Image (spheres, rainbow, N blue to C red):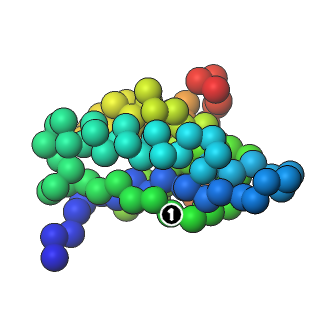
Amino acid sequence: MSKREHYFFVCSNVRPDGNPRPSCGRAGAQEIYAALKAELNQRGLGKTVARVCTTSCLDMCDYGPVVSVQPENTFHLHMKPERAAALVQAMVEGALVEDLASTTDGAVGTDKDR
């Protein structure tokens, strides 16, 4: 079994119709998943360095779509497919995409790219 150094967990939770809470699955999660996977594969990192996975609710519904990056333990909020390259580049550099990032202590970055 090959263990990767980094994991991108894309919240893909879909709430039932009529539920007042937002859900990442209805806000473009599959497109984000595909964009991250494509970006990693294009850079030759998808089979060795990082893996993209879907997950259920990450409890940050009001900030979705959300991507959690591990082991960095960061959450990237209001994610869009066109930001996949920036997120992968940040992983390569060991940096944060400041305007999308939140740490586990609850500090939330700006949402200027919404």
Kindly indicate the quadrant of the structure image that contains residue 41. top left
- Looking at the image, the residue that sits furthest to the bottom is 1
Q: In this view, does 56 lie to the left or right of 4?
A: right
Residue 12 x/y as whole percent: 55, 55
Residue 91 x/y as whole percent: 31, 43
Q: Is residue 26 left or right of residue 52?
A: right
Mark 1 belongs to which amino acid? Thr
Residue appearing at x 59%, y 24% in the figure: 113
Residue 54 x/y as whole percent: 45, 59
**Closest to the observer: 75 or 40?**
40
Which residue position is annotated with label 1?
55
Give the number of marks: 1
Q: What element carries label 1?
A: strand
- Give above or below for 1 relative to 84: below
Can residue 95 be spotted in the picture? no
Q: In this view, does 114 lie to the left or right of 21?
A: left
Q: Is residue 95 left or right of residue 81?
A: left
Residue 53 x/y as whole percent: 39, 59
**Closest to the observer: 38 or 79?**
38
Residue appearing at x 64%, y 26% in the figure: 114
Report the quarter where the N terminus lies: bottom left
- Give above or below for 78 relative to 106: above
**Closest to the observer: 24 or 93?**
24
- Looking at the image, the residue that sits furthest to the front is 17
Residue appearing at x 57%, y 65% in the figure: 56
**Closest to the observer: 98 or 11?**
11
- Give above or below for 68 relative to 40: below
Can residue 52 be spotted in the picture? yes
Neighbor class of circle 1 (other Cα within 10 Å; few <14, some 14-19, many 20+) is some
